[in-house]
Amino acid sequence: DAGVTQTPRHEVAEKGQTIILKCEPVSGHNDLFWYRQTKIQGLELLSYFRSKSLMEDGGAFKDRFKAEMLNSSFSTLKIQPTEPKDSAVYLCASSLRWGGSAETLYFGSGTRLTVL
Amino acid sequence: AQSVTQPDARVTVSEGASLQLRCKYSYFGTPYLFWYVQYPRQGLQLLLKYYPGDPVVQGVNGFEAEFSKSNSSFHLRKASVHWSDWAVYFCAVMNYGSSGNKLIFGIGTLLSVKP
């Protein structure tokens, strides 16, 4: 089975631009998560979907960050407008809700975003 | 509030030496705990997970962790470190709530291995 696929691997944006990050979860997984990873803050949860329903919309990240699940096998994270402080690695993860491997998160390799 | 603390930002050990990475948790009730590893330029991968039962949990690649309720700890151990273990290690606790189940991660510990 293919793992979690994230594209692009790297993204460079000018301040104020709109960028869209993409994620394909493991086939058959019910839950999908978007995290932001920085050295200072570690892993911060941005969004959480359960069977395509938005369960967590990121609290402090709500104003410029919007995640969507267009179908069960594709999700996007839009940042609009970008700011230099958004420079980070964005990780997508998926998991099963039931079964032996339930609650184990499978992560993609991430998208490294640099905002100039 | 539920949280995880990894007090050591970086740990350096010699290849072949033993290893302990520390993790302290704060959780009301019985926690479900995890250790993940992140190799350079990759996503996180599960090393092991603890569900209530035997306090010592075996994971992949010779890693194990021990749960202690009295110390609120879930330290990761390995008897003999290999250079390929050079990575960042994250401890996490599962937060169960009405809005779904989410992992809360520690800040991570970078393990460096000396030849």
Image (cartoon, rainbow, N blue to C red):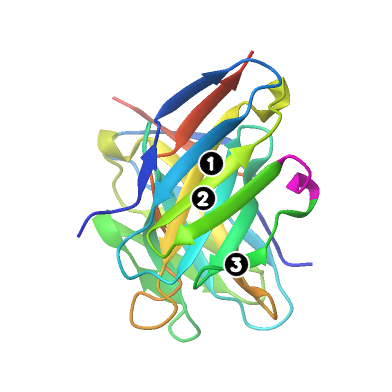
For disc 3, the marked residue is B102
Residues shaded magenta: A60-64
Q: Is residue B21 visible?
A: no
Specify the quadrant that holds the N terminus of chain B. Answer: bottom right
**Residue in view at x 28 percent, y 47 percent:** B80
Residue A37 picture location, percent across and down: 58, 39
Front: mark 2 or 3: 3
**Residue in view at x 68 percent, y 75 percent:** B99
In the rendered structure, the answer to whether residue A67 lies left or right of residue A65 reads left
Q: Earlier in the sequence, mark 1 or mark 3?
A: 3
**Residue in view at x 40 percent, y 31 percent:** A8
The three-letter code of the residue at mark 1 reads Thr
The three-letter code of the residue at mark 3 reads Lys
For disc 1, the marked residue is B109
Q: CA separation, marks 2 and 3? A: 15 Å
Rendered image: mark on residue B90: 2
Relative to B86, is B103 above or below? Answer: below
In the rendered structure, the answer to whether residue A11 lies left or right of residue A42 reads left
Q: CA separation, marks 1 and 2? A: 7 Å
Q: Does label 2 lie on the same chain as label 1?
A: yes
Front: mark 1 or 2: 2
Residue A33 picture location, percent across and down: 53, 57
| For the residues bearing labels 1 and 3, Cβ distance under 8 angstroms | no
**Residue in view at x 49 percent, y 73 percent:** A51
